[in-house]
């Protein structure tokens, strides 16, 4: 790994309107941000727009980072919300979350259940809709309203699915431990 | 530091979305705090036929977006006044704010004021015939689609047209009024301010009429009517008193109020903005 300037130094340089530092920040973070965003939304154009919006927002407000935690986490917080707002303005675009196609091979699943135990299996048994809600609300920390825009469902559905998913997980875990 | 990192298999599954929710979640949590793993994911995103997005193109667009010229002074003023950035841009792109337009308006007014200052009664007439119609012409051009092609795509987006037009009207007046007032100071006597109420009335008439016809057409019609009326008056009495009388001024006030009421009642018809062409 190249040990260039760290993210905070780059961000400080961006605040000083340094286009080179901005480029470096983009090179460093656009890749994983795009991968993670594309796991939330299948529309590549929307993902590209969200990545662009994210870095434009960083350029405009580099001091939005308050020095708490990782810059990567701060960037992701911006990116997922940019994606949500892109979805909101474009409307009608299905944001399919969940995991299309490729089913894990049998031995992978065995490995997984070893590695993650009950919780992994319980999560794997959730319906795709419920997993999407868990992902948006629990893992990405979105509000119910933001999750509703991301998943293109009413807010009330987000809440019921979340409630059901939690109940399901609780039951599955209780069953496993007894 | 646990020394734990994404192994190559996990990384591949993560990038190809062939992982489970639990595995993906722990990968994502790890990525937030591990720069080397982020770099590996980034490298995987760039290469090997996956091409999630076109990173070079997105970078070009991002750079273009941040390199657009700084917002104009006027736009920053609007933002300072508490308008969200997007609305400030919408209001400020009105063609009326382009320098040429303002220069033209200023030249006409200056001409009228000079005529008023040096040309006695005739000059006052010129000023009285020009000053009251300038605001309504400027307002009309600030939202007429023919003058302002930029308005077209804006109206396609779900943006309250009424709000846009009122914001622009206010912004235009805030710009145009001080200029016209300044010029008015050169004009002797009450005439300097007698045009204010007619001007308000005409702006309201244009707003109301634009629920039927295009704003620019209605502004031109109003201006022509006013010019004709002024010329008739000048021909008949030879003195500008009639316009300055309290009764006439009250009439203009009533005209302004009535037209504005009509505009508000019929504001839904403003959607026709797009079909005028």
Image (cartoon, rainbow, N blue to C red):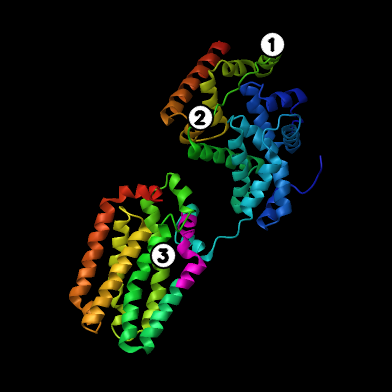
Q: Position of residue B163 (x, y in %)?
A: 37, 53
Residue corresponding to mark 2: A151
Q: Residues within 10 Å of mark 3 (few under 14, many from 20)?
A: many
Q: Is residue B134 magenta?
A: no
Q: Residue at x 50, y 21 (%)?
A: A165
For this rendering, which residue is in front, B12 or B136? B136
Whichever of labels 2 and 1 marks the residue nearer the N terminus, that label is 1
Gap in Å between the C-alphas at discs 3 and 1? 69 Å
Quadrant for the N terminus of chain B, please. Answer: top right
Residue corresponding to mark 1: A106
Q: Which subunit holds the residue at mark 3?
A: B
Q: Is residue A112 above or below residue B48?
A: above
User: Could you tell whether A168 is left or right of B109 in the image?
Assistant: right
Look at the image and tell me whether residue A66 can be seen: no
Where disc 2 sits, the SS reads helix
Q: For the magenta stretch, what is the residue range?
A: B87-104
* Comparing labels 3 and 2, the label whose residue is closer to the camera: 3
Where disc 1 sits, the SS reads helix
Instruction: Tell me, yes or no, whether the two marked residues, 2 and 1, touch with CB atoms within 8 Å.
Output: no
Q: Position of residue B232 (x, y in %)?
A: 24, 76
Q: Residue at x 24, y 84 (%)?
A: B239
Residue B225 lies in quadrant: bottom left
Residue B2 lies in quadrant: top right
User: Could you tell whether B238 is left or right of A157 in the image?
Assistant: left
Q: Are marks 2 and 1 on the same chain?
A: yes
């Amino acid at each position: 790994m190249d040990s260039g300037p760290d993210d905070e130094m780059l961000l400080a340089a961006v605040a000083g309107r340094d286009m080179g530092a901005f480029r470096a920040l983009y090179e460093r973070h656009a890749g994983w941000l795009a991968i993670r965003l594309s796991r939330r939304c299948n529309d590549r154009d929307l993902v590209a727009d969200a990545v662009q919006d994210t870095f434009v927002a960083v350029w405009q407000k580099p001091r939005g980072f308050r020095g708490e935690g990782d810059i990567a986490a701060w960037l992701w917080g911006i990116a997922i919300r940019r994606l949500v707002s892109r979805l909101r303005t474009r409307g009608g675009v299905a944001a399919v979350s969940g995991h299309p196609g490729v089913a894990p091979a049998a031995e992978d699943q065995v490995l997984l259940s070893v590695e993650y135990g009950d919780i992994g299996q319980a999560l794997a048994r959730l319906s795709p809709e419920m997993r999407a809600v868990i992902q948006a609300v629990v893992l990405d920390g979105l509000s119910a309203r933001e999750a509703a825009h991301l998943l293109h469902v009413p807010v009330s559905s987000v809440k019921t699915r979340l409630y059901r998913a939690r109940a399901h997980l609780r039951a599955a875990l209780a069953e496993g431990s007894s | 530091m646990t020394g734990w990192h994404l192994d190559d298999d996990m990384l591949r599954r993560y990038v190809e979305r062939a992982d489970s929710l639990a595995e993906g979640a722990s990968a994502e949590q790890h990525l937030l705090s591990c720069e080397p793993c982020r770099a590996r994911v980034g490298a995987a995103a760039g290469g090997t036929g996956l091409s999630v997005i076109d990173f070079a193109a997105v970078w070009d667009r991002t750079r273009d977006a941040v390199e657009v010229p700084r917002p104009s002074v006027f736009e920053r003023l609007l933002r300072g006044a508490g308008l969200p950035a997007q609305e400030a841009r919408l209001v400020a792109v009105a063609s009326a704010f382009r320098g040429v337009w303002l220069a033209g308006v200023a030249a006409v007014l200056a001409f009228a004021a000079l005529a008023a200052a040096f040309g006695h009664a005739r000059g006052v007439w010129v000023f009285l015939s020009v000053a009251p119609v300038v605001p309504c012409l400027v307002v009309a051009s600030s939202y007429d689609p023919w003058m302002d092609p930029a308005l077209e795509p804006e109206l396609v987006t779900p943006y309250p047209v009424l709000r846009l037009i009122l914001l622009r009207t206010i912004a235009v007046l805030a710009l145009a009024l001080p200029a016209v007032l300044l010029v008015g100071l050169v004009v002797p006597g009450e005439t300097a301010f007698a045009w204010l109420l007619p001007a308000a009335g005409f702006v309201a008439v244009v707003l109301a009429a634009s629920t039927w016809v295009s704003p620019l057409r209605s502004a031109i019609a109003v201006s022509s009517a006013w010019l004709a009326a002024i010329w008739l008056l000048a021909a008949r009495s030879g003195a500008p008193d009639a316009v300055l009388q309290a009764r006439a001024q009250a009439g203009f006030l009533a005209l302004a109020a009535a037209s504005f009421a009509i505009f508000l009642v019929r504001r839904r018809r403003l959607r026709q903005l797009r079909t005028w062409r």
